[in-house]
Image (spheres, rainbow, N blue to C red):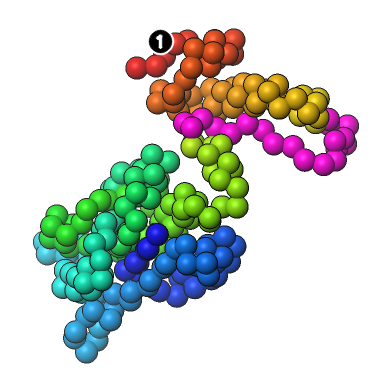
C-alpha cells in the first residue's frame, strides 16, 4: 500500500509514522508513505500556496497551481486515487476504508484554511472524505486516521488476521466485551463461559454480546448489518423490532 500526502506541514507526520505498527509496517515494506511539501511546488520567491478568495470573505484558499503541480508529480510515478480531506466529504466508515484499501495507491491532500480552489476540486480530485461532522485545523489528522484504518487491512500489518476480521465495524457490529487476568478484580468476576474452554459456547456468547452492545450503543449500525435469522431472534430478546430496519 502506498500513500502520498500533500501538506504544508510535513513535520506533522514525523512522530506518528515512527511508532507502533505503522513504523513496523514501513520497515517491512508493507506500506510506503511519501510526504510532499506543497510549498516546494510554488514557484514564486515567497513560496506562496494560498491567497484571498475572489468575492471577498474571511480566510485564505489554497491556490490551484501548486496543488496541480504536486498532484502531477505523484502521477508521474503511478496512478494514485486522489482524495481531498475536507469536512464536506463522505463521512469515513469501515466500508469506505475497505474501498480505499482496494485502490493500492492513495494520494491524500490535506486541506487547510478555507479549503482549496474549486477548479482543483472539480477536475483533479477522485474522492472527498471527512472523518466526522466536526472541524479541525487541517487535513493532516484525517490523513493519519486513513493511514491507520486502511493499513490495518494490509496483510502482515496486524499480527493476527483474525483480530482484524472480528474487530468493531468489520462485520457491521460492535465488538464483544474483552477480559483478561486477574479473574477476580475487586470482586468483579470474569464471565464463567470464558473460562470454560468450550469454544463453541464462547463464540455464541460473544455473538450475543456483540449484538446486545450494538443495539444499546449504535442501533443505527443494525440497518446495514448482515443479520442471520438467529441474530434477529437474539435481538428480539433484547427488545429490538425488525421493522426498525428500512
Q: Residue furthest bottom?
A: 45
Residue visible at 65% across and 26% down in the picture: 203
Residue visible at 75% across and 25% down in the picture: 198
Residue visible at 48% across and 32% down in the picture: 171
**Is residue 136 placed above or below 13 in the rendered structure?**
above
Direction from residue 60 to residue 241 in the image, left or right: right
**Is residue 204 placed above or below 157 in the rendered structure?**
above
Which of 168 and 103 lies nearest the eye of the viewer?
103
Residue visible at 71% across and 27% down in the picture: 199
Direction from residue 205 to residue 51 in the image, left or right: left
Q: Main secondary structure of the magenta part?
A: loop
What segment carries the magenta color?
Answer: 171-189
Question: Total marks drawn?
Answer: 1
Reading the image, the residue beneath label 1 is 243
The quadrant holding residue 123 is bottom left
- Magenta stretch: residue 174 in it? yes
Q: Quadrant of the N terminus?
A: bottom left
- Magenta stretch: residue 132 in it? no
Which of 189 and 116 lies nearest the eye of the viewer?
189
- Residue 69 location (% of width, % of height): 19, 74
- Residue 104 location (% of width, % of height): 34, 56
Can the viewer see residue 63 in this picture?
Answer: no
- Residue 183 location (% of width, % of height): 85, 35
Q: Quadrant of the C terminus?
A: top left
Q: Circle 1: is it few (<14), some (14-19), or many (20+) Cα within 10 Å?
A: few
Q: Secondary structure at mark 1?
A: helix
Direction from residue 216 to residue 140 in the image, left or right: left
- Residue 138 location (% of width, % of height): 37, 61
Amino acid at each position: 500500500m502506498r500513500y502520498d500526502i500533500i501538506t504544508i506541514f510535513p513535520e506533522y507526520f514525523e512522530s506518528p509514522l515512527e511508532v507502533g505498527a505503522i513504523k513496523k509496517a514501513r520497515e517491512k515494506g508493507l506500506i510506503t508513505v511519501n510526504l510532499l511539501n506543497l510549498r516546494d511546488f510554488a514557484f514564486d520567491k515567497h513560496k506562496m500556496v494560498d491567497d484571498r478568495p475572489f468575492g471577498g470573505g474571511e480566510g485564505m484558499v489554497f491556490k490551484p497551481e501548486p496543488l496541480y503541480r504536486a498532484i502531477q508529480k505523484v502521477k508521474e510515478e503511478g496512478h494514485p486515487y486522489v482524495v481531498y480531506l475536507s469536512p464536506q466529504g463522505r463521512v469515513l466508515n469501515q466500508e469506505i476504508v475497505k474501498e480505499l484499501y482496494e485502490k493500492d495507491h492513495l494520494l491524500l491532500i490535506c486541506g487547510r484554511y478555507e479549503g482549496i480552489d474549486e477548479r482543483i476540486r472539480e477536475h483533479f480530485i477522485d474522492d472527498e472524505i471527512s472523518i466526522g461532522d466536526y472541524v479541525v485545523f487541517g487535513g493532516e489528522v484525517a490523513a493519519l486516521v486513513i493511514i491507520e484504518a486502511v493499513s490495518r487491512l494490509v496483510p502482515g500489518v496486524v499480527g493476527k488476521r483474525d483480530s482484524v476480521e472480528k474487530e468493531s465495524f468489520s462485520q457491521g457490529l460492535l465488538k464483544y466485551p474483552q477480559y483478561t487476568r486477574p479473574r477476580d478484580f475487586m470482586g468483579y468476576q470474569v464471565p464463567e463461559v470464558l473460562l470454560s474452554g468450550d469454544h463453541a459456547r464462547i463464540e455464541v456468547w460473544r455473538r450475543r454480546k456483540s449484538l446486545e452492545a450494538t443495539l444499546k450503543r449504535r442501533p443505527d449500525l443494525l440497518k446495514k448489518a448482515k443479520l442471520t435469522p438467529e441474530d434477529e431472534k437474539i435481538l428480539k430478546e433484547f427488545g429490538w423490532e425488525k421493522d426498525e430496519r428500512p
